[in-house]
Image (spheres, grey):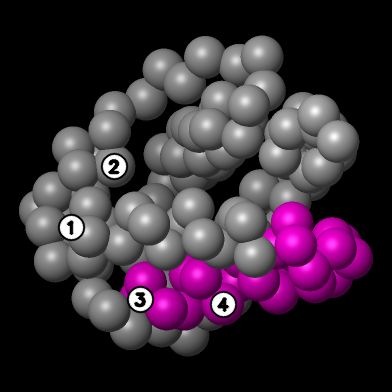
Amino acid sequence: MNETLYDRLGGRDGIDKLCDRIVELHLQNEVAGPRYQALDQEALDRARTKVKEFIAAGSGGPVEYTGRSMIETHTGMNVSAAEYVAVMDDIMQAMNEMEYPRPVCDEVLGIAYSLKGEIIHR
């Protein structure tokens, strides 16, 4: 099996749909929602585009990530552990709704969890 995570996520189309659903869930989330609701449409669209790039590039896809590092992006945002967990829950919910196999979900969550130290309280 030589499929990349990018392939197992459905390529660019699958990643785009997944990220769109994750952002929808973030906007509805009681804990993390206020941070996303405070963004104007242009900022929200830009963030959505960068997340799509980040996941596509980081999962082995033929995409170049053009955004800032996780540390640069989250420094000064004071993301709490509760917000981080809420975002992780949204990712899992979106993946479950889209019926990704458990190993794919676990891999994505493992990657997201590995970034925890670059996101919380910076």
Earlier along the polypeptide chain: callout 1 or callout 2?
2
Magenta stretch: includes residue 89: yes
Dot 1 or dot 4: first in sequence order is: 1
- Which of discs 3 and 2 lies nearer the camera? The answer is 2
Residue drawn at 48 percent across, 70 percent down: 87
Q: Residue 70: which numbered mark, if any?
A: 2
50 w.r.t. 40: above or below:
above
Write the residue at 73% across / 32% down. 4
Of the numbered discs in the image, which one, if any, rests on residue 77? Answer: 1
Looking at the image, residue 73 lies above or below residue 32:
above
Cβ–Cβ under 8 Å for marks 1 and 2: no
Callout 2 environment at 10 Å: few (<14), some (14 to 19), or many (20+)? some
Q: Is any part of residue 59 visible from this angle? A: yes
Residue for badge 4: 89
Secondary structure at badge 1 equals loop
Q: Are marks 3 and 2 in contact (CB under 8 Å)?
A: no
Q: Residue sitting at 79 percent across and 43 percent down?
A: 9
Q: Which residues are magenta?
A: 83-105
Circle 1: is it few (<14), some (14-19), or many (20+) Cα within 10 Å?
Answer: few
Q: Quadrant of the C terminus?
A: bottom left
Kind of residue sitting beneath label 2: Met
Q: CA distance from mark 4 to mark 2?
A: 19 Å
The quadrant of the image that shows the N terminus is top right
Q: Position of residue 101 (x, y in %)?
A: 85, 63
Mark 3 vs mark 4: which is more N-terminal?
3
Q: Secondary structure at mark 4?
A: helix
- Give me the C-alpha separation between circle 1 and circle 4: 20 Å
Name the kind of residue labelled 3 in the image. Answer: Glu
Kind of residue sitting beneath label 1: Met
Residue type for callout 4: Asp
Q: Which mark is residue 83?
A: 3
Q: Position of residue 31 (x, y in %)?
A: 41, 83
